[in-house]
Amino acid sequence: MQKNKISAVLFDVDGTLADTERDGHRLAFNAAFNDFGLSWNWNVTLYGELLNITGGKERIRYYIEKYAPDKLKINELDAWIADLHSIKTKHFVALLNRGLIPLRPGVTRLIQELRLAKIKIAIATNTTPENVTTLLKSTLGEDSLSWFNVIAAGNIVPKKKPAPDIYLWTLERLGLQAQQCIAIEDSECGLKSALAAGLDTVVTVNSYTEKQDFTDASIVLSDLGEPSEPFSVLSGQDHGNKLVNVEMLNNIRTQ
Ligand code: XBP
Ligand code: MG
């Protein structure tokens, strides 16, 4: 077997492992607003704007400042937002546990190929840790958490993406240099974070991110691809590959 040039793949979660935003997080936010007696409704278009603010609590604060400034006078606003956000997390986790959010094409296949090739797998995400563990268990099975060498999520670093902090933290925990790894992302904000950490990055877009600026991504794809349904290339060279596999990731590393 040929020696791998990559030692680890670092996966983003929201939008990358699964299409969690429009019919997952957005619905969970709205359900939490309802529980809190708020008449707020984040429709699909508005949520697209709000996604420019990463992190759920940060997103709520931005919304208040722009669309509901009367709430700025709430005493202990940070605690109020944290309470509202924890209700949102409960709704999101319940949605995942109902099996309503599948992994995107090629994700399970690639994870299994990486495991077989003894390439490390890590998660680097803005989202709350409970969201990640529930998504992995509900889609890949109860044991799947042990497949991941590092799961880096939420507030463990001071600055969320697009800052590089979460990727740098993950690399340190893996004991690897960026040059030994590849990141997989879905958004401009995530790409900026990964590039700033020195990582070559594959982007798989979704309906919220397909028009974003992915200059400097190694390749921009519709998805990771399955043998029966190859990816389409939005920009970059596929060098004859039709799905993202270990061989393709090794080649990206040597470009
Ligand atoms: C996605 C996010 C998250 C989710 C909501 O980032 O910014 O905020 O939208 O999660 P990534 P929380 O793609 O890097 O995972 O509400 O738990 O913050
Ligand atoms: Mg993402």
Image (cartoon, rainbow, N blue to C red):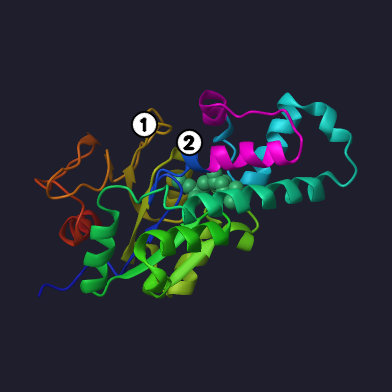
- The residue sitting at 69% across, 29% down in the picture is 40
- The residue sitting at 52% across, 54% down in the picture is 164
Q: What stretch is highlighted in magenta?
A: 25-49
Q: Which disc, if any, is residue 210?
A: 1
Q: What element carries label 2?
A: helix
In the picture, residue 198 is in which quadrant? bottom left
Q: Where is residue 180 in the image (x, y as percent from the top left)?
A: 32, 66
For the residues labelled 1 and 2, say whether their Cβ atoms are less than 8 Å apart: no
Q: Nearer the viewer, residue 102 or 47?
A: 102
Taking the magenta stretch, the answer to whether it contains residue 36 is: yes
**Taking the image as drawn, is residue 126 in sight?**
no
Q: Position of residue 238 (x, y in %)?
A: 16, 44
Q: Which amino acid does label 1 sit on?
A: Glu
Q: Mark 1, residues whose alpha carbon is within 10 Å: few (<14), some, or many (≥20)?
A: some
Q: Which of 7 and 204 is in front in this view?
A: 204
Q: Name the residue under label 2.
A: 22
Q: Is the magenta region chiefly helix, strand or loop?
A: helix
